[in-house]
Image (cartoon, rainbow, N blue to C red):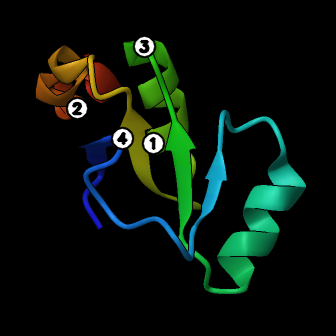
Amino acid sequence: MPELAAEGTIDIDDALVADDVADDAQLRAAFDAGRPVVVRATSPDAIKAALARPEVACVLVPADRADLLSLDLTELTYG
């Protein structure tokens, strides 16, 4: 599963799909059960927050926001 993908381009049928990373218990339970965690994000800050969580396997961005797919994740994370 890629770290970052456009909505609709990968199979997420078995994954927990969340709109944010606010529900720690839900993310942890899915991760502990071996279920992939996928989070939707619409901004660089939301992508950074999601990828900072060890439970998150992939971040989905809206299909019409291809610009987010070209973010430099190393630069975003470490500055």
| Residue position marked by numbered label 1 in the rendering | 51
Query: In this rendering, would 42 be left or right of 8?
Result: right
- Among numbered discs 4 and 2, the one appearing first in the sequence: 4
Q: In 3D space, how far apart are the residues under numbered discs 4 and 1 (Cα atoms)?
A: 16 Å
Q: Which residue does the numbered mark 3 point to in the structure image?
A: 43
First in sequence: mark 4 vs mark 1? 4
| Residue at numbered disc 4 | 7
Camera-near label (3 vs 2) is 3
The label on residue 73 is 2
The answer to which of 6 and 23 lies nearer the viewer is 6
- Assign a secondary structure to mark 2: helix
User: Residue at left 18%, top 29%?
Assistant: 69
* CA distance separating discs 3 and 4: 14 Å
Quarter of the image for residue 4 reads top left
- For the point 29% across and 28% down, which residue is it? 63
Q: Tell me the element at label 3.
A: loop
**Pointers 1 and 2 in contact (CB under 8 A)?**
yes
The answer to which of marks 3 and 4 sits earlier in the sequence is 4
Query: Is residue 13 placed above or below 32 in the rendered structure?
Result: above
The amino acid type found where label 3 is placed reads Ser
Disc 4 on helix, strand or loop?
A: loop
Indicate the position of residue 8 as horizontal and vertical percent values: 33, 47
* Foreground label between 3 and 4: 4
How packed mark 2 is, by other alpha carbons closer than 10 Å (few <14, some 14-19, many 20 or more), is some
23 over 73 or under it: above or below: below
On residue 41, which mark appears? Answer: none
Amino acid type of the residue tagged 2 in the rendering: Leu
Left or right of 13? Residue 67 is left
Mark 4 neighbour density, 10 Å: few (under 14) some (14–19) many (20 or more): some
- In this rendering, does residue 73 appear at all? yes
Q: CA distance from mark 4 to mark 2?
A: 18 Å
Viewed as shown, does residue 2 lie left or right of 36? left
